[in-house]
Structures are given as C-alpha cells and as structure tokens.
C-alpha cells in the first residue's frame, strides 16, 4: 500500500500522519487503499512539494441517505416552513423599525408595538420547530403515515402561533395607518 502524507512524502499507517512537521495533517492514500468505497477522486501527489492544496479529494455526501421518501418530503416541508418563519420574523422587525421612528412632531406611533408582539409570536412558532424535531419525522408518524402523529401536532401548534403573529402584523398595519391619518389631520388643524 503506497501512502504519502501531505508534506514530505513520509510513510505512515492508514489515516495516521507520522514524522516531524506533519502532526495533524491529512493523509492521502492511494485509490487502491479502499477499493470497496470507490477510492478517492484523485491520486496522491507526484512530488512531495505538490501537497494537499494542489489536489482536491472529493467524497460523495447525500443528506438524505437512509431516509424514506416520506421522510425526505417531511424534511423539505420543514425546511420551507422554517424559512417562511424566518422571513416573517424579519418582516416584523423591519416593520417595527420603520414604524417606531418618531414623526416630525416628535410623536411615536404606538401601533409599532404590535409588530413586536408579532415578532414574539413568530419566535414561538420558530421554537415549535424544535419541539417537532427532527425535521425528517415532523410530518410523518411512526407508522409512516404523512400528516399524522404527535410531532405533526406540534407543527400545527407552530402554525397557529404563526397565524396569531400574522394577525398581529395586520393589526399593526391597520392601527399604524389610522394613527398616521390622525397625525396628518392634527397637523392640518394645528398648522405644524
């Protein structure tokens, strides 16, 4: 078995670097070393000076290895829900930032507090993804039935929290528009 380390071409046992100056460095093994695994994508460097940076060792990574089709669907759905919750949280915080700035008269609209409440509910809905973890089993029962089981109930709880947060966002928008109209009417009356 021909082996070389990433530096100096020092011989070693499989997976263990040996010699001065190579502690903690990866070992490049010839493709014949692991024929059952398909070997590595590249061969060892031709000269000791080539080192690890001139060759790339590629390994196959499949995140769905060992999952059933329903578990893959569950993981993808949970990923989409997680990203939707993050998007809603960002919208709530951006709306709070924009609406909480004082007007020219120095007044702060109190409707911006509803955006903070919405952010609170979105945070709880995001936490519900942890309650329903792991993602590949969130929508699948122990029997393999889709959209059933205890974990799916926790996802539903998170969706209810999200619906409450969306309602708070809408209430904040309606209240903010009303307060803005009232502030405009007051400025016309007082002339400021």
Image: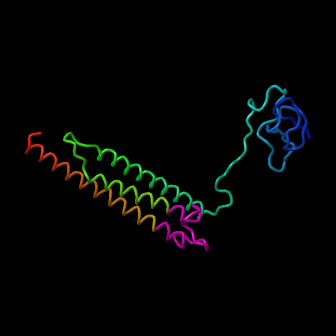
Q: How is the image coloured?
A: rainbow
Estimate the x, y position of residue 179 in percent, counting from the top left: 20, 51
Estimate the x, y position of residue 53 in percent, counting from the top left: 74, 31
> Where is residue 22, by image quadrant?
top right
Estimate the x, y position of residue 69 in percent, counting from the top left: 61, 62
Q: Is residue 147 above or below residue 190?
A: below
Left or right position of 191 against 36: left
Looking at the rendered image, the quarter that the C terminus falls into is top left
Q: Which residues are magenta?
A: 128-156
Q: Is residue 89 above or below residue 128?
A: above
Residue closest to the far front: 106
Estimate the x, y position of residue 148 in percent, counting from the top left: 53, 72
- Asked whether residue 127 is drawn in magenta, I would say no
> Where is residue 133, by image quadrant?
bottom right
Q: Residue at x 52, y 55 (%)?
A: 79
Left or right position of 55 against 75: right
Q: Which of 101 and 164 lies nearest the eye of the viewer?
A: 101
Q: Residue at x 32, y 61 (%)?
A: 167
């Amino acid at each position: 078995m021909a082996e070389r380390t990433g530096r100096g071409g020092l011989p070693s046992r499989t997976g263990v670097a040996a010699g001065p100056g190579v502690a903690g460095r990866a070992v490049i093994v010839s493709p014949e070393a692991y024929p059952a695994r398909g070997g590595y994508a590249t061969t060892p460097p031709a000269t000791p000076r080539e080192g690890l940076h001139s060759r790339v060792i590629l390994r196959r990574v499949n995140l769905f290895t060992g999952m059933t089709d329903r578990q893959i669907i569950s993981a993808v759905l949970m990923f989409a829900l997680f990203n939707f919750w993050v998007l809603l949280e960002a919208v709530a915080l951006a709306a709070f930032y924009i609406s909480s700035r004082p007007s020219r008269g120095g007044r702060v609209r109190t409707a911006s507090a509803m955006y903070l409440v919405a952010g609170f509910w979105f945070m709880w809905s995001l936490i519900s993804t942890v309650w329903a973890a792991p993602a590949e089993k969130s929508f699948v029962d122990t029997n393999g039935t889709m959209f059933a089981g205890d974990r799916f109930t926790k996802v539903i709880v998170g969706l209810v929290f999200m619906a409450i947060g969306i309602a708070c966002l809408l209430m904040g928008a309606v209240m903010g528009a009303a307060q803005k109209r009232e502030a405009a009417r007051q400025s016309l009356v007082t002339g400021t």
